[in-house]
Image: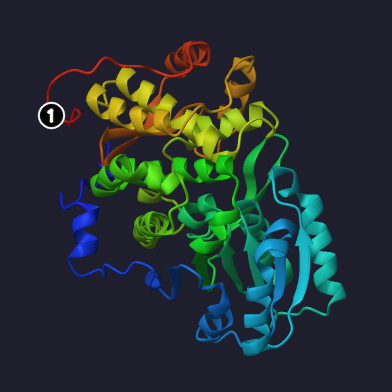
């Protein structure tokens, strides 16, 4: 089984900011996602929406975009964005949709195709997605498929989208049988993540995004894990400097993973830590009980428990992650969720092969292992106890944080 993680340099995140990466973290930071012939820039800053038109014009996008926007995000933060776009490109066409998983469906996609056609959109048109992960996924899918593909840009307005879904080009919609079962890989031309918009995100939504930040730390960055352990209260309270550090570091981690494996043929699968069971829980409850990050939080707890059961995850590593998950507060309960429905959703998971479920397990903080041959009986029995017991609570044992090689 390949080792697909790296424990990093051991240097703390705080030290890296102080040593050459600017103490004034309110300044905009950029990073590049390199994908062979394709490449794009991710901009992370505080108050940069008012510069979006200027930043995007620098990528060669000079015509007014077709904006697909979350209606609430547009009402709260759209004025500065639209003014900036008008100054640099002319007046955009704006189409509002509702956020939330209910909009992530073919009905919404068909309505957007109709609006594009009605506005005269052609292959020279480009789309700007302004909203959370659902808006980004839907707008990206429309961009990937309208006239066989037109450009799009992601301007994420939730923490979850800023740390995860806006980067990497995975776009798609849900169907009743499962999450993201219809989709494509279609990379954005740019990503503009303004942490100032997070001030209006409800506490539950912010916490949902933090589960994805914990995921990034667990799979790739002991330094980020340590930073979150020390500064979690500042982040969850909406401190902009702390949020910007977390968003930038998560974007850096994801950009590195995606650059190495754009189409998820190997190492990119590490980003699915917590998502196998998480997606199954969402599907089993009709996408109505959990926010995505909350389901991933439960999914990470399940992956840690399975990792302990299989001898892959050391108990001390699991407990470290579980402690951080508990500090984020209670998630919606697992009470009454049907094991059979969870099992059916797992069997339909895109990573399943020949009746076997593939899962990303933690080998230690910053390092993972992809396990492709989990015995169905072992997994089903674990899930039965997991749904009843909520999450594993391994007793801490002395010893180094290292799993079996």
Residue at left offset 42%, top offset 51%: 265
Single out the residue that lies furthest toward the right: 118
* Observer-nearest of 387 and 79: 79
**Residue 212 left/right relative to 203:** left
Residue 44 placement (x, y as % from top left): 44, 67
Q: Please say if 340 is above or below 245.
A: above
| Residue 204 in sight in this render | yes
Residue at left offset 54%, top offset 56%: 198
Q: Please say if 391 is above or below 76.
A: above
Residue 162 placement (x, y as % from top left): 50, 57
Callout 1 environment at 10 Å: few (<14), some (14 to 19), or many (20+)? few
Q: How is the image coloured?
A: rainbow
Circle 1 sits on which residue? Answer: 400
* Observer-nearest of 337 and 309: 337
**Residue 303 left/right relative to 159:** left
| Residue 149 in sight in this render | no
Residue 199 in which image quadrant = bottom right
Residue at left offset 59%, top offset 23%: 342
The quadrant in which the C terminus is found is: top left
Residue at left offset 68%, top offset 62%: 76
Mark 1: which secondary structure? Answer: loop
Q: Please say if 387 is above or below 323.
A: above
Residue 305 placement (x, y as % from top left): 37, 21
Q: How many marks?
A: 1
Residue 306 in which image quadrant = top left
Residue 229 in which image quadrant = top left
**Residue 308 left/right relative to 390:** left
Residue 92 placement (x, y as % from top left): 73, 79
The quadrant in which the N terminus is found is: top left
């Amino acid at each position: 089984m390949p080792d697909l993680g790296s424990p990093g340099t051991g240097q703390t995140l705080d030290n890296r900011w102080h040593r050459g990466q600017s103490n004034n973290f309110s300044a905009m930071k950029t990073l590049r996602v390199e994908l062979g012939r394709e490449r794009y820039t991710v901009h992370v800053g505080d108050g940069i929406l008012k510069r979006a038109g200027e930043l995007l014009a620098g990528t060669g996008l000079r015509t007014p975009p077709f904006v697909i926007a979350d209606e609430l995000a547009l009402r709260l933060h759209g004025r500065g964005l639209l003014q900036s776009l008008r100054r640099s490109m002319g007046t955009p066409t704006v189409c509002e949709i509702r956020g939330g998983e209910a909009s992530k469906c073919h009905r919404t996609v068909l309505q957007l195709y109709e609006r594009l056609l009605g506005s005269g959109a052609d292959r020279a048109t480009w789309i700007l997605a302004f909203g959370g992960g659902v808006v980004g996924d839907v707008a990206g899918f429309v961009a990937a498929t309208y006239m066989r593909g037109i450009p799009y840009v992601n301007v994420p307005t939730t923490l979850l989208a800023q740390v995860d879904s806006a980067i990497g080009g995975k776009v798609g919609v849900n169907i009743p049988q499962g999450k993201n079962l219809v989709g494509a890989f279609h990379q954005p031309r740019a990503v503009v993540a303004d942490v100032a918009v997070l001030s209006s995100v409800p506490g539950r939504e912010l916490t949902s995004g933090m589960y994805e930040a914990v995921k990034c730390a667990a799979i790739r960055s002991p330094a980020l894990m340590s930073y979150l352990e020390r500064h979690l209260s500042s982040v969850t309270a909406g401190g902009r400097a702390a949020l910007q550090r977390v968003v930038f570091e998560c974007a850096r981690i994801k950009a590195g993973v995606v650059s190495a494996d754009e189409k998820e043929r190997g190492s990119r699968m590490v980003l699915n830590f917590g998502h196998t069971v998480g997606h199954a829980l969402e599907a089993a409850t009709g996408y109505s009980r959990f926010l995505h990050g909350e389901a991933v939080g439960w999914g990470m707890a399940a992956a840690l428990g399975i990792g302990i059961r299989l001898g892959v995850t050391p108990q001390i590593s699991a407990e470290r992650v579980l402690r951080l998950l508990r500090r984020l507060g209670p998630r919606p309960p697992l009470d009454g969720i049907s094991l059979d429905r969870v099992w059916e959703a797992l069997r339909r998971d895109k990573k399943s092969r020949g009746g076997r479920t593939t899962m990303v397990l933690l080998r230690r903080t910053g390092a993972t292992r992809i396990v492709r041959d989990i015995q169905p009986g072992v997994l089903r029995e674990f899930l039965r106890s997991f749904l009843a017991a909520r999450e594993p609570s391994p007793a801490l044992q002395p010893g180094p944080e290292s799993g079996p090689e």
